[in-house]
Image: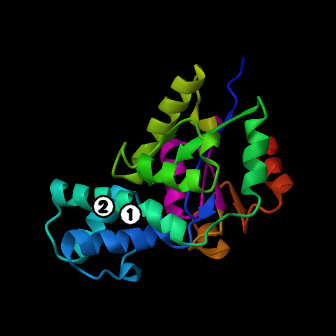
């Protein structure tokens, strides 16, 4: 039997907007660990893994990038994240809930996560918005600090979970940044980009995704891309 088509989802700016919860938790974590008031706008962090963001914060502040300090930033961020999620008004992005439900109910698709979040952070965010249950496996920042190295981990975990072999040619990596597009291309997957994050349609188009959307509000159009694949 042919393996189902595999969808690998990014989280922030693709599935949800957290209302700035993640950013605020990072700023607070930096204050707790380093006693510095951080302005995240000065760092090009979108689309990076949580581990890489922690390193970039240390680099930006001209602090030594050590495993101990990086881990302290991450652990403090993860401790603060649930409180920030509860304090802020975020949302599931347009069309996402309908697409997830459709894919969940179809034998022709499988879906998981390919995200720069730590697994604990991914669970906190998606549980808060009631959609964690759709993702039985995923590749996370726990697997690698480098975003472009996450694809093979996602394919391996998908294959182990479903007991079948998933190949890049039958996989879509879905995200809102050029880093998501590059990550998909690095493993040989197709890519779907969506301009619901920090990047415009025009800037995403420059990176030549397989398909590009303003948002996923037109779920039929999204599913049509998969049908054509």
Residue that lies at the very extreme toward the top in this rendered image: 1
Pointer 2 and pointer 1: residues touching (CB < 8 Å)? Answer: yes
Let me know if residue 189 is in the magenta part: yes
Residue 209: quarter of image: bottom right
From what the image shows, is residue 167 above or below residue 135?
above
Please state which of residues 197 and 37 is positioned toward the viewer in this rendering.
Answer: 37
Callout 1 environment at 10 Å: few (<14), some (14 to 19), or many (20+)? Answer: some
Report how many numbered discs are placed on residues in the image: 2
The x and y percentages for residue 190 are: 63, 47
Find the distance from the CA under tag 2 to the CA under tag 1.
6 Å
Q: Which residues make up the magenta segment?
A: 170-193
Residue 79, relative to residue 40: is it above or below?
above
- Which residue corresponds to the image point at 35% horizontal and 46% vertical from the top-left? 144
Residue 10 visible in the current orientation: no
Residue 56: horizontal and vertical position, in percent?
29, 68
Question: Quarter holding the C terminus?
Answer: top right
Would you identify the image quadrant in which residue 58 lies? bottom left
Residue 128 visible to an observer of this rendering: yes
* Horizontal side, residue 36 vs residue 167: left or right: left
Residue 65, placed above or below residue 37: above
Q: Residue 212: image x %, image y %?
A: 70, 62
**Residue annotated with mark 2:** 76
User: Which residue corresponds to mark 1?
Assistant: 80
Could you say whether the residue bearing mark 2 is in a helix, strand or loop? helix
Q: Is residue 225 magenta?
A: no
Q: Residue at x 75, y 61 (%)?
A: 216
Q: Is residue 70 above or below residue 132?
A: below
């Amino acid at each position: 039997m042919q393996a189902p088509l595999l969808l690998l989802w990014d989280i922030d700016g693709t599935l949800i907007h957290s209302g700035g919860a993640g950013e605020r938790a990072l700023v607070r974590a930096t204050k707790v660990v380093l006693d510095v008031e951080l302005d995240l706008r000065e760092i090009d962090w979108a689309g990076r893994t949580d581990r890489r963001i922690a390193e970039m914060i240390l680099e930006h502040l001209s602090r030594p990038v050590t495993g101990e300090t990086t881990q302290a930033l991450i652990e403090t961020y993860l401790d603060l994240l649930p409180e920030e999620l509860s304090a802020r008004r975020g949302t599931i992005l347009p069309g996402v809930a309908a697409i997830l439900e459709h894919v969940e109910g179809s034998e022709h698709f499988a879906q998981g996560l390919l995200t720069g979040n730590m697994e604990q952070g991914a669970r906190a965010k998606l549980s808060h918005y009631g959609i964690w249950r759709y993702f039985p496996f995923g590749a996370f920042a726990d697997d690698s600090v480098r975003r472009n190295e996450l694809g093979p981990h996602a394919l391996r975990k998908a294959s182990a979970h479903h007991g079948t072999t998933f190949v890049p040619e039958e996989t879509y990596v879905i995200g809102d940044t050029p880093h998501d597009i590059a990550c998909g291309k690095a493993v040989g997957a197709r890519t779907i980009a969506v301009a619901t994050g920090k990047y415009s349609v025009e800037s995403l188009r420059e990176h030549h995704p397989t398909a590009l959307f303003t948002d996923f509000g037109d779920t039929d159009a999204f599913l049509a891309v998969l049908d054509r694949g």
